[in-house]
Image (tube, rainbow, N blue to C red):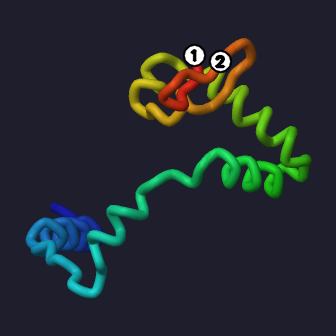
Amino acid sequence: MPTNGQKAATMRAAKKTSRKSTVDETVNYTELAESKKGMGFDKAAKSVAAKQGIPAERARAVIAAGRAKASKKAVAANPNLKKVPTKGSHKTKGGTYK
Protein backbone atom coordinates (compact mmCIF):
# COMPACT_ATOMS: atom_id res chain seq x y z
CA MET A 1 0.00 0.00 0.00
CA PRO A 2 1.50 3.39 -0.97
CA THR A 3 2.31 5.93 1.69
CA ASN A 4 0.99 9.49 1.70
CA GLY A 5 4.31 10.76 0.34
CA GLN A 6 4.18 8.32 -2.55
CA LYS A 7 0.60 9.34 -3.34
CA ALA A 8 1.59 13.01 -3.35
CA ALA A 9 4.54 12.34 -5.64
CA THR A 10 2.30 10.48 -8.06
CA MET A 11 -0.23 13.32 -8.04
CA ARG A 12 2.51 15.92 -8.73
CA ALA A 13 3.85 13.86 -11.63
CA ALA A 14 0.37 13.52 -13.11
CA LYS A 15 -0.19 17.28 -12.77
CA LYS A 16 3.07 18.08 -14.55
CA THR A 17 2.22 15.91 -17.54
CA SER A 18 -1.30 17.30 -17.85
CA ARG A 19 -0.16 20.95 -18.02
CA LYS A 20 -0.29 22.55 -21.43
CA SER A 21 2.70 24.63 -22.46
CA THR A 22 1.68 28.10 -23.54
CA VAL A 23 3.59 30.67 -25.51
CA ASP A 24 4.56 33.65 -23.40
CA GLU A 25 3.42 36.66 -25.40
CA THR A 26 5.50 39.10 -23.35
CA VAL A 27 8.75 37.67 -24.76
CA ASN A 28 10.01 38.92 -28.11
CA TYR A 29 11.20 35.64 -29.59
CA THR A 30 12.83 37.20 -32.66
CA GLU A 31 14.99 39.36 -30.43
CA LEU A 32 15.82 36.33 -28.32
CA ALA A 33 16.88 34.38 -31.43
CA GLU A 34 19.15 37.21 -32.55
CA SER A 35 20.84 37.35 -29.16
CA LYS A 36 22.16 33.79 -29.57
CA LYS A 37 25.30 35.17 -31.25
CA GLY A 38 28.49 34.51 -29.29
CA MET A 39 30.31 37.18 -27.37
CA GLY A 40 33.35 37.35 -29.64
CA PHE A 41 37.04 36.76 -29.06
CA ASP A 42 37.96 40.10 -27.45
CA LYS A 43 34.96 40.11 -25.11
CA ALA A 44 35.68 36.49 -24.13
CA ALA A 45 39.31 37.43 -23.44
CA LYS A 46 38.17 40.33 -21.28
CA SER A 47 35.83 38.01 -19.37
CA VAL A 48 38.59 35.44 -18.78
CA ALA A 49 40.99 38.18 -17.67
CA ALA A 50 38.49 39.49 -15.14
CA LYS A 51 37.63 36.03 -13.77
CA GLN A 52 41.21 34.81 -13.47
CA GLY A 53 42.85 38.12 -12.61
CA ILE A 54 45.34 37.97 -15.46
CA PRO A 55 46.28 40.52 -18.16
CA ALA A 56 44.17 40.63 -21.34
CA GLU A 57 47.09 39.49 -23.52
CA ARG A 58 47.50 36.35 -21.40
CA ALA A 59 43.74 35.76 -21.48
CA ARG A 60 43.86 35.81 -25.28
CA ALA A 61 46.56 33.13 -25.15
CA VAL A 62 44.40 31.02 -22.82
CA ILE A 63 41.47 31.17 -25.24
CA ALA A 64 43.67 30.43 -28.25
CA ALA A 65 45.13 27.41 -26.43
CA GLY A 66 41.63 26.12 -25.82
CA ARG A 67 40.87 26.45 -29.52
CA ALA A 68 44.08 24.61 -30.39
CA LYS A 69 42.96 21.71 -28.21
CA ALA A 70 39.48 21.61 -29.79
CA SER A 71 38.65 18.44 -31.64
CA LYS A 72 37.60 18.35 -35.29
CA LYS A 73 34.08 17.55 -34.12
CA ALA A 74 34.04 20.69 -31.95
CA VAL A 75 35.30 22.85 -34.82
CA ALA A 76 32.63 21.38 -37.11
CA ALA A 77 29.97 22.21 -34.52
CA ASN A 78 31.30 25.75 -34.02
CA PRO A 79 32.87 27.10 -37.22
CA ASN A 80 33.83 30.35 -35.44
CA LEU A 81 36.71 28.42 -33.88
CA LYS A 82 38.41 28.62 -37.29
CA LYS A 83 38.68 32.40 -36.79
CA VAL A 84 40.98 32.06 -33.78
CA PRO A 85 44.68 32.31 -34.68
CA THR A 86 46.88 29.47 -33.51
CA LYS A 87 50.63 29.05 -33.54
CA GLY A 88 51.93 28.46 -37.05
CA SER A 89 48.65 29.39 -38.74
CA HIS A 90 48.09 31.97 -41.44
CA LYS A 91 45.00 33.99 -42.26
CA THR A 92 43.11 32.95 -45.40
CA LYS A 93 40.99 35.11 -47.65
CA GLY A 94 37.72 34.32 -45.81
CA GLY A 95 39.09 35.51 -42.46
CA THR A 96 39.72 32.03 -41.13
CA TYR A 97 43.07 30.64 -40.06
CA LYS A 98 44.62 27.51 -41.53
Crowdedness near tag 2: few (<14), some (14–19) or many (≥20) residues, C-alpha within 10 Å: few
Crowdedness near tag 1: few (<14), some (14–19) or many (≥20) residues, C-alpha within 10 Å: few
**Secondary structure at numbered mark 2:** loop
Image quarter where the N terminus lies is: bottom left
Residue located beneath label 2 in the image:
90
**Horizontal side, residue 83 vs residue 77: left or right:** right
- What amino acid type is highlighted by mark number 2? His
Q: Which of the marked residues, 2 or 1, is nearer the chain's N terminus?
A: 2
Q: Is residue 85 above or below residue 23?
A: above
Q: Is residue 58 above or below residue 33?
A: above
Q: Nearer the viewer, residue 36 or 88?
A: 88
Marks 2/1: CA distance?
A: 6 Å
Q: Residue furthest top?
A: 88
Image quarter where the C terminus lies is: top right
Q: Which mark is residue 98?
A: 1
Can you give x and y, in whole percent of width and height, for residue 34 in the image? 37, 63
Q: Nearer the viewer, residue 56 or 74?
A: 56
Q: Is residue 95 above or below residue 21?
A: above
* Count of numbered circles in the view: 2
- What amino acid type is highlighted by mark number 1? Lys
Q: Residue at x 77, y 34 (%)?
A: 62
Can you give x and y, in whole percent of width and height, for residue 70 in the image? 57, 23
**Horizontal side, residue 8 vs residue 77: left or right:** left
**Secondary structure at numbered mark 1:** loop
Q: Residue at x 72, y 26 (%)?
A: 65
Q: Residue at x 82, y 57 (%)?
A: 50
Q: Residue at x 86, y 41 (%)?
A: 57
